[in-house]
Image (cartoon, grey):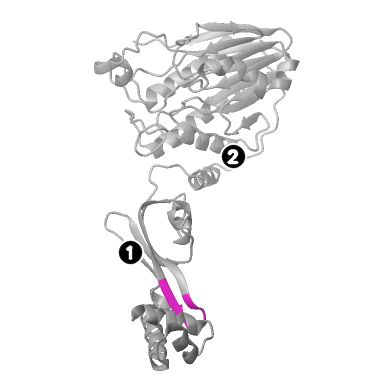
Amino acid sequence: MADYDKKAYELKQDGKTRYEIAEILGISSRQARRGYERYENKLKKEEVPKDNKYTVTINNDGTQTSEVLLEMSREQAKDEKFLLKAHGYDLEIWEIVSARNNIWNVYSKQDGIQVLYSSKITVKPTKGKLTLKDIEEFCTELVKKKPMKHIPLREYKPSNLMLEIATFDVHLGKLAWYGETGESYDYKIARQRFLGVIQDFKDRVKGRTFEKVLFPFGQDFFNIDNLQQSTTAGTGQDCDLRWKKLFVKGVEIASEAIDMLKELGPVKVLYVPGNHDNTTSYGAINCLFYKYASDENVTIDRSPKARKYEEYGKCLVGFGHGEKERRRIDKIMQEEAARAWGRTVYREWHLGHLHKESSGGYQMTEEYPGLIVRRIGAITGTDNWHYESGFVGVVKKAEAFIWDKEEGLKDKMFSNIVIK
């Protein structure tokens, strides 16, 4: 009889009389009336009071469970982003642990039967992920503590030279112990090495003037990317600082370096993502962008693109981390910087990642028609994983290049790290 009840109700909704319903279903008019009344009463019992359509439970483990009636499609019921938004959660702050959606027929006098979903999700905070809100909050605090002042453009002496400072793969925060690896390394040692090689290059170019100082930033400047102390891809690391403190220290140290380089000429900072700190370094470059927004002596390219190009007269220098491009690297510049390629004569790639000047397929310098590919050394220490894997014996160093606008690369300098 339950089937008759539902059919009788549906026919009633279509405007049929009880006599017409009885004739269609082959039952008496009395049975027809009782049928659609029973089904209507059933729907009324299923109707959820308005004040009970949304509930949130805060669980002891820090998760939250939300229950709500939603109108959605089957595809939307499988979409995590849709469910988070529908339950009122910020996608950057919360992520779904579990979700369950059941079809729920709801009756109202105004709309009749509505096919909704009883949606229940459990969410947890996205701990360890750097969000744009985190970056915005940090930059706001940075400006409050040290308000930006307009710094007029310095009067640098005319020059046809560009100085490039290549301090790749710093891995700030990496932890190494002498007893395990033969050398110690932490954020204090990293700071000393990083600023030390910059001071070394400054001393060695004393008396020379530069039209531009090029400073690639990123390239695994940080060793970790989240509170779980792992890389962007999730590989765990030995680290001596909590992520938030590491982030703050990193921005401070990078600022020190930029201020030092400003004494040599106008500084241009290029963001080049690495594979250890893709998110963290992007947050840091945005903080640096806001910090130097009023400083005419500093230009910061914070584009998230993996590769950057700097054209200087007849010179074209490309920067990439070199982890993913591999043997394709000799064909990329011609496509991505085609016009600059046509205007220039001296073209080079400067890559990081391997912590040494050669790789499996490249020698210290690999030359192709119209292009030179260089791997840049690193100043970072040797952690236990690298030591156990046998990646030892490489001279740790930073490099600097002096480019002439018309004559190309004129000088190349090394600043070696002496481990005592």
Eyeballing the image, is 198 above or below 127?
above
Helix, strand or loop for the magenta stretch, by majority: strand
Residue 24 at x, y = what percent?
A: 47, 84
Q: What's under tag 1, amino acid-wise?
A: Thr
Q: Which sits in the foreground, 72 or 364?
A: 72
Q: Is residue 123 magenta?
A: no
Residue at position x 43%, y 24% from top? 191
Eyeballing the image, is 198 above or below 4?
above
- Distance between the Cα atoms at labels 2 and 1? 40 Å
Callout 2 secondary element? helix
Instruction: Please state if 65 lies on the left or on the right of 275 as rendered.
Output: left
Asked where in the image residue 51 lies, by quadrant, the reply is: bottom left
Earlier sequence position, callout 2 versus callout 1:
1
From the image, tell me which residue sits under label 2: 290
Q: What's under tag 2, amino acid-wise?
A: Tyr
Q: Which mark is residue 376?
A: none
**Label 2: how many residues lie within 10 Å, few (<14), some (14-19) or many (20+)?**
some
Q: Is residue 110 magenta?
A: yes
Q: Which mark is residue 57?
A: 1
- Looking at the rendering, in which quadrant would you find the N terminus? bottom left
- Looking at the rendering, in which quadrant would you find the C terminus? top left
**Visible in this render: residue 42?**
yes
Eyeballing the image, is 271 above or below 47?
above
Residue at position x 66%, y 9% from top? 370
Residue 184 at x, y = what percent?
A: 32, 19
Residue 332 at x, y = what percent?
A: 61, 20
* Residue range highlighted in magenta: 105-113
| Circle nearer the viewer, 2 or 1 | 1
Q: How many marks?
A: 2
Residue 364 at x, y = what percent?
A: 50, 6
Callout 1 secondary element? strand
